[in-house]
Amino acid sequence: MSEALATATKLFHAEGGLDPVTAARHIATAMDGADDGELFLEYRESEAISLEDGRIRSASFDTRRGFGLRAVLGEASYYAHAGELSDEALARAAATIKSARAQEHAMVAAGPAATTTPLYAGLNPLAEMPFSTRAALLSEIDSFARAADRRVTQVMASIAGEWQVVEILRADGSRIADLRPLVRLNVSVVMEQNGRRESGSHGAGGRTSYAPLIDPAYWQSAVHEAIRQATVNLESIPAPAGEMPVVLGSGWPGILLHEAIGHGLEGDFNRKQTSAFAGLMGSRIAAKGVTVVDDGTLKDRRGSLTIDDEGTPTSRTTLIEDGILIGYIQDRQNARLMNMRATGNGRRQSYAHSPMPRMTNTIMLGGDATKEDMIKSVKRGLYAVNFGGGQVDITSGKFVFSAAEAYLIEDGKVTAPVKGATLIGNGPDALTKVEMIGNDPALDPGIGTCGKNGQGVPVGVGQPTMKMSGLTIGGTAA
């Protein structure tokens, strides 16, 4: 028995009191005549500590355990959940689903293939050191930041972690489990110079223990990066407005790719014909050289999963190859309805939510151009290194993103930092404007959370430096 399954057996069956044989009988009742379905069991411990102005502002710890029972028939999904693990609660859920489905019948799909290769250690980061150690780290970050630069007037720092144990059971008695650690550290500073105040921030994390985060070299580099960003912002000038070429930095700027393109390639939006990319399979939707993958198999990454929340092993799915749309991100239901392969992207926020197709780590692959050559090729444009918030309309593909760190490019050289720049465009059109792709692909530091239909899940993004022509910049310059 694997470590994950042994832990799940202890938490859900020995301690939780849920008999696997009886559970399989209830699952069979709910799924009788259905296309698909599963029982999703979850145990989660989570904590978050935040510091502001030298004091712990908040500290929370939460433990939750529950189940979600689902039966799928055609386009319909019947779901019941409870925060109680017992045969009685599961029996009620199964009866509710059976009653709601009435007399509909179908052929139950076979369960996903099993995997035996965990992508991360199953340790519980919350149990590896005293709570006081993490709280003390935040105080040390505050002192270090103020000593590093006398212009620092305010420091905010937070550390958060969770340990999620999931088990997926099916009517045939099959069981698969996963142990999922997740940690994150964030540092923000406010700096003042000549009466002007600006901020900078940096965060990082992944599916690891807390050990990397509390390493002084690690968190001190996060502090220095936050100070560097704030320093840049103190020197920034109002951003220009208009249409101009844009060079996007590597790594985190891939969030634009995630929002503007990735969501539009999720199976449910395309099956329902609500995506701007619907009906374009096999068509050119990006410039030559653009290849985009969604890869849930990267070791220790924030968006990675050994199995998704339906029990399917995650995979490296090519979505766009050399500019041609060749794949979608799929869960089991939408893959079946579209006669496609499930890609291991069925994800849910918790046991109280039904799964749907979601991204894991969405990445554009590298090319052969250098960042220097891209900059040199621009007469007047924008170099966007870091992004803040943004929003996208899935149906139209229109997006707006704010640049947290950006610079003017003038006569082939990076010059003044600018503030208030927003990138405005259209997803289906944006990737056709790619002119140069860098040889420096990078992943984000491990801070992404994706929202969809009210559910949030951890994700990753990545890309090389990239030059795009003719994007609209919304600026603040008069």
Image (tube, rainbow, N blue to C red):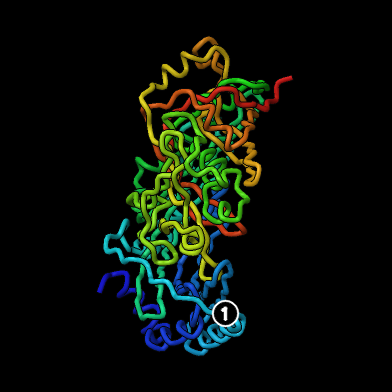
Image quadrant assignment for residue 475: top right
Q: Classify residue 455 as left or right of residue 359.
A: right
- Classify residue 418 by image quadrant: top right
Question: Relative to residue 149, is residue 154 drawn left or right?
Answer: right
Image spot of residue 198 (x, y percent): 61, 32
Residue 211 makes an appearance in the image: yes
Residue designated by label 1: 104
User: Percent from the top left, x then y, of residue 8?
Assistant: 36, 75
Residue at horizontal 58 percent and vertical 38 percent from the top: 388
- Indicate the position of residue 147 as horizontal and vertical percent values: 47, 35
Q: Position of residue 449 (x, y in %)?
A: 52, 51
Indicate the quadrant where residue 192 lies: top right
Instruction: State the quadrant of the N terminus.
Output: bottom left
Residue at point 46%, 13% (across, down) = 376
**Res. 159 in view:** no
Q: Residue at x 47, y 38 (%)?
A: 252
Q: Residue furthest left?
A: 1
Spot the residue most to the top: 411
Asked if 202 appears above or below 287 in the picture, the reply is below
- Front-lying residue, 463 or 446: 463
For the residue marked with disc 1, what is the amino acid?
Glu
Q: Element type at marker 1?
A: loop
Give the answer, above or below, for where 260 lies relative to 356.
Answer: above
Label 1, residues with CA under 10 Å away: few <14, some 14-19, many ≥20 = few
**Of residues 184 and 449, the one drawn nearer to the viewer in this rendering:** 449
